[in-house]
Amino acid sequence: MRTTARRGIGSVAWGLALFLVPALLWVRNIAASHPSETMAPPVLTSPPSADLVYAIIPTEGRSENADIFARSSVDGTLAKITDHPGPDFAPDLSADRTRIVFVSDRAEPGNMDIYIMDADGRNVRRVTTDPAIDTRPSLAPDGTRVVFTRADEDTFELWIADIERGTEYRLTSNDVQDLHPAWSPDGRLIVFARYVGTDLELFAIAPDGTGEQRLTELPGSDADPSWSPDGHAIAFVHSTQENGQADLYTLPIDPGTLSIGEIQPVLEQRPRLSDPFWSTDGSWLAFTEFTDAGYTLTAQPLRSGATAAPDADVLSLITDELRGGYRLLGIDGTI
C-alpha cells in the first residue's frame, strides 16, 4: 500500500473513506449457505451455519453503491448481507460473532456514520449521527463500544462510541491525522496509525486516552495494524514513497507494559499490499494484494516468533476483478 501525505476531505470525502477501509471479513460459522446466483446474490435470511467471507462488492462497478456480501469459503457462493442504494462498507465483527458494525450513509446521503446490525443483516441500528465522516470502525472485545476515525475538514481523530448508551467521546485531539484504529484482544489498548511529517507511524493508547506511546520509527509509513489473537504481536504494512512496494512486518509487544521487541519481516517488496489479519491460532497472516488482474486475498504461513515459515509457499485464497478490495477480519487456522 502506498501512503501519501496528509490531506483534507472536501469533495473527495467518499473516495478517501473507501481508501481508508477496503473491506473484507472471513468468519467461521457466521452466515448461511445459498444457491449460487451470478447476477443477483440472495439476501441472507437463515441463521448462521457456514464458513463465509464477508466482502464489500461495488455493484455495477460503482463504489458508492457498495454492499456487504458473504462469500462461501468452500464453493464461492455469494449471499447478500445488506441491500441499500447507498454505500455499506468497512464491516467489523463482534468477538461473539453475533453483530457487525459497518459504515453507511443510509440515514443521510453523503454523511457516513457507524451502524450496527445482527450478523445476518437484521436489526440495523445507527450508532453515530455526527455530520462529519465516521469510518474504519473497530469493536471492543466485549462488543459494547466501537473506536473509529472521524474526519471533519482537515482533522482526522479517533473517537469511541458506547453502542448501548448512545454516548461518545474524543480519544485523540491534535493537529495531525490519526487513522486505522484496532482494538486489542484484551481491550486494554488501541493501536492506530498517525502521520508524523509525511509518514505514518504506529502508536498505542488506552481507551481512556492515557498512556499514549509511539511504537514504530521506521523510514517510510507504517499502517493497517492488526493484533495477533493472543495480543502479543501487531502485524502491519510498511511502505516507502520510492518504489510503491510494501512489506509485511510483525511487532512483538507486551500489552501490559507496552514494551516492544524487534520488528520481524514476514514478506518484503510486494505490490500494493494491505489489510493483514491473523488466523485464530496465529499460524497464518492473510492480506490483500492488488495487481493488474484485480484483488487477491493471500495467506502466509508463520512460524514461532511471528515470522514467515521457512520455504513455505504463499497461498492465494481468492482472486477477483472486483473494485473495492478485501479486508480480512477472521479466519481459522485450517486453510
Image: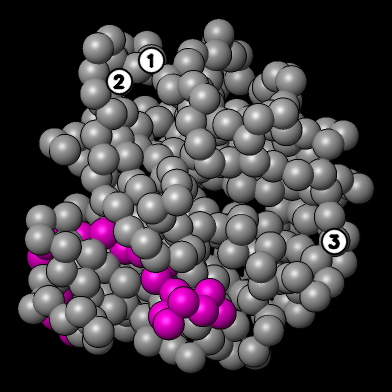
Residue 190 shows up from this direction: no
Q: Are marks 3 and 1 in contact (CB under 8 Å)?
A: no
In the rendered image, which quarter is residue 124 located in?
bottom left
Identified at 28% across, 14% down, the residue is: 309
Q: Secondary structure at mark 1?
A: strand
**Which residue is tagged 3?**
8
**Which residue is tagged 2?**
302
Task: Say which amino acid is labelled 2.
Answer: Leu
**Which residue is tagged 1?**
307
Marks 3 and 2 sit apart, C-alpha to C-alpha, by 38 Å
Residue 61 on the magenta span: yes
Identified at 46% across, 34% down, the residue is: 227
The percent coordinates of residue 172 (x first, y second) are 78, 48
Q: Secondary structure at mark 3?
A: loop
Task: Say which amino acid is labelled 3.
Answer: Gly
Above-or-below relation of 104 to 138:
below
Q: Earlier in the sequence, mark 3 or mark 1?
A: 3
Q: Are marks 3 and 2 in contact (CB under 8 Å)?
A: no
Above-or-below relation of 170 to 207:
below
Query: Over which residues does the magenta segment extend?
Result: 45-64
Above-or-below relation of 47 to 310:
below
Identified at 64% across, 76% down, the residue is: 112
Q: Residues within 10 Å of mark 3 (few under 14, many from 20)?
A: some
Q: Earlier in the sequence, mark 1 or mark 2?
A: 2
